[in-house]
């Protein structure tokens, strides 16, 4: 037995000696491990480089004052819109209102339009915004006959020109099978500029909210038109209540002690085509004069276009762009006094001190809100859809290349359409269009670092 065990030990020792690696095999193993470590290190460096480039392109441009206004990529549907006013300011403002309510439970509201009265200096601005909107729609309908508009069949991408671009940014149906390339079709005025609709309020102070059971009885009109109506514009089809005396606030509730007229006793949901008799004749506006003035300006443009097509097209595009800027600036001035609300997750807009209670939100987290909107302060981009498009410097050049998209600029579709029709480039959008950036040719893409 002992001899047999010694023999087994000697055999195992011989096997271990044979299993020992030779110096050549050990050297090969060291080289193999070194190569794998180098590959792993290179992958980490590439990933870090990609993250740094991505951070530079998305965040670094925001620090550069030249390209601070370049539109950011669209946010995710699950993310909420940023607040125009910081949350700390909103909380401090709410605390001050609460303290003022406790100090004086019954008080008369003095500042318009919170007290139900109109702001006198904004009445004429409302008329100008209304006329500018009519002029913009008329000018776009004429310009689209010369400069075509392309829109994607599967997403909201729009391009101004005879042929669509080749930039792969489609996020619509089956975009992965097409490598995110767009499928273009002919577009219209609604693709160039959009005006979201909201519920019309007969009494913005007495009943500022629309209930869920009233969603089919109250008409919906463009939000910018509702803003002009609340600021002093009079339209027979959409009457609104005008007050001669301010309202009172009793423990946070609005109370109106003004004598109620027979016109106010009618059902507010019937919307008769009669103008309220409480309107001050100095404040009201004759709609026939507005329509006649708008039609005269339009006929003048048409008459001029019949003389010389080239000059008239340039004049029409310049006047359309001027009306566009007048509409945007006037709407911003009105929004400083008259509040406009928007949903933090979807495109719903409501003009008034409060948002409506209609359960129609289908965006992110709507189940937790029972379909109600998450209202917050709106901006001009919520009131008027600017719809940014890629800027084309030369219409006769080939379509925009996907590999050169970082050299291209953007602009609102209205501005891009007017510029291609002959209007001068406005100074407000020169940096956004990146006119100072020289884009390389297609065969020079590989040479660019």
Image (spheres, grey):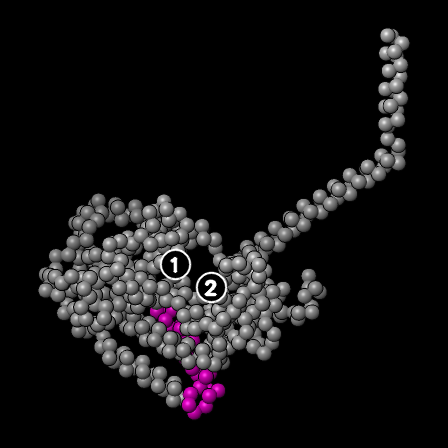
Q: Main secondary structure of the magenta part?
A: helix
Q: Assess whether residue 177 is covered by the magenta stretch.
A: no
Query: Please, what secondary structure does the residue beneath circle 2 have?
Result: loop
State whether residue 357 appears in this view: yes
Describe residue 209's horizontal placement relative to residue 449 as left or right: left
Q: Which residues fall within the magenta stretch?
A: 305-330
Helix, strand or loop at disc 1? loop
Task: Give the numbered dot on residue 156.
Answer: 2
Q: Which residue is mark 1?
A: 347
Residue found 89% across the figure and 21% down from its top: 14
Quadrant of the frame with the N terminus: top right
Q: What whole-number distance in Å separates the C-alpha atoms at marks 2 and 1?
A: 14 Å
Q: Is residue 84 above or below residue 44?
A: below
Cβ–Cβ under 8 Å for marks 2 and 1: no
Image point 40% across, 63% down: which residue?
381
Occupied quadrant, residue 402: bottom right
Residue 435 lies, in percent from the top left, at: 56, 71
**What percent of the width, then of the height, locates residue 235?**
24, 72
For this view, does 132 lie left or right of residue 310?
Answer: left
Q: Residue at x 24, y 61 (%)?
A: 218
Q: Is 132 on the left or on the right of 45, as rendered?
A: left
Within 10 angstroms of label 1, few (less than 14), some, or many (20 or more) residues?
some
* Residue 311 falls inside the magenta stretch: yes
Question: Which badge, 2 or 1, is on the more N-terminal residue?
Answer: 2
Q: Is residue 150 above or below residue 71?
A: below
Q: Residue at x 19, y 71 (%)?
A: 273
Residue 157: horizontal and vertical position, in percent? 49, 65
Q: Nearer the viewer, residue 131 or 60?
A: 131
């Amino acid at each position: 037995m002992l001899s047999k065990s010694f023999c087994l030990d000697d055999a195992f020792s011989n096997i271990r000696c044979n299993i020992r690696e030779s110096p050549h095999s050990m050297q090969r193993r060291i080289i193999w491990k070194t190569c794998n470590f180098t590959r792993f290190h290179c992958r980490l460096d590439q990933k870090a480089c990609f993250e740094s480039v991505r951070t530079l392109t998305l965040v670094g441009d925001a620090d550069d004052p030249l390209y601070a206004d370049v539109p950011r990529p669209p946010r995710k549907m699950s993310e909420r819109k940023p607040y125009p006013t910081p949350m700390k300011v909103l909380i401090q403002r709410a605390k001050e209102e609460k303290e003022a309510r406790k100090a004086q439970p019954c008080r008369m509201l003095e500042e318009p339009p919170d007290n139900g009265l109109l702001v006198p200096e904004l009445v004429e601005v409302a008329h100008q915004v209304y006329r500018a909107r009519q002029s913009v729609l008329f000018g776009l309908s004429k310009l689209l006959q010369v400069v075509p508009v392309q829109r994607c069949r599967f997403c909201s991408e729009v391009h101004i020109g005879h042929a669509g671009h080749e930039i792969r940014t489609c996020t619509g149906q089956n975009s992965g099978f097409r490598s995110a390339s767009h499928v273009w079709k002919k577009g219209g005025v609604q693709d160039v500029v959009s005006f979201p609709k909201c519920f019309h309020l007969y009494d913005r102070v007495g009943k500022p909210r629309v209930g869920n059971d009233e969603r089919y009885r109250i008409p919906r009109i463009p939000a910018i038109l509702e803003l002009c109506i609340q600021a002093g514009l009079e339209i027979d089809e959409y009457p609104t209540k005008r007050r001669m005396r301010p309202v009172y606030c009793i423990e946070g509730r609005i109370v109106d002690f003004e004598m109620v007229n027979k016109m106010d006793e009618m059902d507010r949901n019937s919307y008769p085509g009669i103008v309220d008799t409480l309107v001050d004749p100095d404040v009201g506006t004759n709609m026939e004069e507005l329509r006649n003035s708008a039609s005269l300006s339009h006929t003048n443009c048409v008459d001029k276009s019949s003389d010389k097509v080239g000059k008239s097209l340039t004049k029409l595009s310049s006047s359309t762009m001027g009306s566009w800027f007048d509409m945007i600036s006037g709407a911003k001035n009105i929004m400083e006094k008259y509040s406009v609300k928007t949903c933090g997750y979807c495109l719903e807009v409501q003009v008034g001190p409060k948002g409506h209670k209609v359960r129609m939100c289908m965006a992110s987290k709507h189940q937790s809100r029972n379909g109600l909107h998450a209202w917050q302060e709106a901006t001009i981009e919520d009131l008027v859809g600017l719809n940014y498009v890629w800027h084309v410097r030369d219409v006769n050049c080939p379509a925009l290349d996907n590999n050169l998209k970082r050299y291209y600029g953007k602009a609102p579709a209205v501005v891009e359409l007017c510029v291609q029709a002959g209007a001068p480039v406005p100074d407000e959008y020169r940096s956004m269009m990146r006119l100072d950036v020289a884009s390389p040719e297609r065969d020079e893409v590989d040479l660019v670092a």
